[in-house]
Image (cartoon, helix red, strand yellow):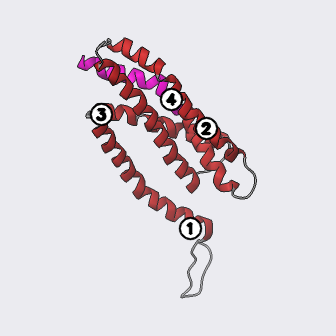
Amino acid sequence: QKVKLPSGFTIEWGGTFKHLESGRNRLMIVLPITFLLISLLLFTTFDSFKQALIVFTGIPFAVTGGILMLLLRGMHFSMSAGIGFIAVSGVAVLNGVVLITFLNQLRTSETTLELKEAIHQGTLLRLRPVLMTALVASLGFVPMALSTGTGAEVQRPLATVVIGGLITSTLLTLLVLPAIYYLTERRTE
């Protein structure tokens, strides 16, 4: 603001800042489209807007963990962190789909369990698949999160977001998602 340039000259930021700005603008277009497509796929999977929303709650859980982990490690948002948020959102949705699909199957099986019993059994029986999905992905990203060599400035934020997001989304998928499922499904019962 204080620099006086001769007429015909301008100042424009370039380099990493320019890439971050252009990438952020593209993310502002791609993310809403991605979340809309995920919502449509979830709706067609469950034939229920309510259950699609229940599964979609895994995304804020994952984002919260990613943000907290970035803060704990003293890192800033970057494009690779943004890609990490997209990746961890996909795993969070997958875990939600695994759990809710199984709960629905238990409730419509020939045993027709009561709602509370179906949630209790379903969460216990799907504990291992949900934990395995999160654990495999998290452990796979640990070397990237700890890297210091060439490309570490790209790898560390992505891995940090994925690991933090998987920790919170897995815990909340196993604890909060069944509670939300119970609250919404007991009304229809």
Q: Residue 37 got which mark?
A: none
Mark 3 crowd level (few <14, some 14–19, many ≥20, 10 Å Cα): some
Q: Is residue 73 above or below residue 181?
A: below
Q: Residue at x 45, y 61 (%)?
A: 26
Q: Counting other residues with Cα less than 10 Å from the Cα at mark 2, is it few (<14), some (14-19), or many (20 or more)?
A: many
Q: Which residues are magenta?
A: 168-189
Query: Where residue 102 sits: x, y (%)?
Result: 38, 25
Packing grade of label 1 (10 A; few <14, some 14-19, many >=20) is few
Q: Is residue 155 magenta?
A: no
Q: Which residue is mark 2?
A: 138
Q: Is residue 17 visible?
A: yes
Give the secondary structure at mark 2.
Answer: helix
Q: Which residue is mark 3?
A: 46
- Element at label 1: helix
Disc 3 residue type?
A: Phe
**Which class describes the residues within 10 Å of circle 4: few (<14), some (14-19), or many (20+)?**
many
Q: Which residue is mark 1?
A: 18
**What residue is at 73 percent from the left and 58 percent from the top?**
150
Question: Three-letter amino acid code at disc 4?
Answer: Val
Which residue is at a point 66% across and 39% down the rendered structure image?
72
- CA separation, marks 4 and 2? 12 Å
Left/right of residue 48 with respect to residue 154 in the rendered view: left
Evaluate whether residue 74 shows in this view. Answer: no
Using the image, tell me which numbered label, if any, was put on residue 130: 4
